[in-house]
């Protein structure tokens, strides 16, 4: 059998084999996300500039922060193009941790408030009617 008629496996039949390259994303995507991050940062600074106060202030600041973090993770850290299992492996543990911290904070508030009910100073406790002792 003549081996000259059959190319070696992986040689492409005499043609050059292209090198495996990583994923290439258009530069425009990165520029658009960079612009969107700039707009979100400007909106976050506008909250301070217009002196928004109260719950609305903190809601807007946290919302803009989470949007910016999500864009950075999705595009610049390439999570948008990863397999769903890897995305879950990276994002689910911090979300569970935040949930558990929230539950702990709620229970801490409950414990703090219940201490006022059961451990109030004697001067603040309601007067109890005492029964006469049997030795009198």
Image (cartoon, grey):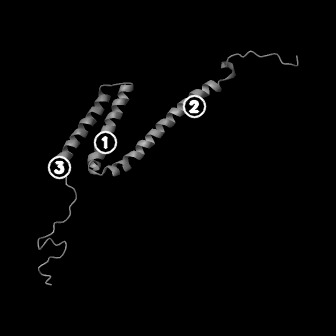
For residue 30, side relative to residue 136 (left or right): left
- For mark 3, give the secondary structure: helix
Q: CA distance from mark 1 to mark 2?
A: 34 Å
The crowding category of the residue bearing disc 3, from other C-alpha atoms within 10 Å (few below 14, some 14 to 19, many at least 20), is few
Relative to 76, residue 112 above or below: above
Q: Tell me where residue 76 appears, x and y as whole percent.
A: 27, 48
Q: Quadrant of residue 55?
A: top left
Q: Position of residue 110 (x, y in %)?
A: 55, 30
Quarter holding residue 17: bottom left
Write the residue at 47% across / 40% down. Answer: 100
Q: Earlier in the sequence, mark 3 or mark 2?
A: 3
**What residue is at 38 percent from the left and 50 percent from the top?**
89
> In x, y percent, where is residue 5?
11, 79
Q: Residue at x 47, y 36 (%)?
A: 102
User: Relative to the observer, which residue lies in front, 17 or 25?
Assistant: 17
- What numbered label is drawn on residue 70? 1
Find the distance from the CA under tag 1 to the CA under tag 3: 19 Å
Q: Is residue 108 left or right of residue 130?
A: left
Q: Earlier in the sequence, mark 1 or mark 3?
A: 3
Q: Which residue is mark 2?
A: 111
Q: For mark 2, does the 10 Å Cα neighbourhood hold few (<14), some (14 to 19), or many (20 or more) residues?
A: few
Residue that numbered label 3 is attached to: 27
The C terminus, quarter of image: top right
């Amino acid at each position: 059998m003549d081996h000259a008629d059959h190319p070696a496996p992986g040689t492409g039949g005499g043609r050059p084999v292209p090198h495996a390259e990583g994923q290439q994303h258009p530069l425009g995507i990165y520029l658009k996300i960079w612009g969107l991050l700039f707009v979100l940062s400007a909106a976050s600074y506008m909250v301070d500039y217009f002196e928004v106060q109260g719950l609305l202030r903190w809601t807007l600041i946290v919302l803009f922060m989470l949007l910016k973090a999500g864009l950075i993770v999705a595009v610049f850290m390439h999570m948008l193009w990863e397999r769903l299992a890897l995305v879950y492996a990276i994002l689910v543990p911090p979300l569970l941790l935040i949930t558990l911290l929230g539950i702990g904070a709620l229970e801490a508030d409950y414990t703090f408030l219940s201490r006022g009910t059961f451990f109030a100073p004697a001067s603040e406790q309601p007067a109890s009617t005492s029964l006469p002792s049997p030795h009198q």
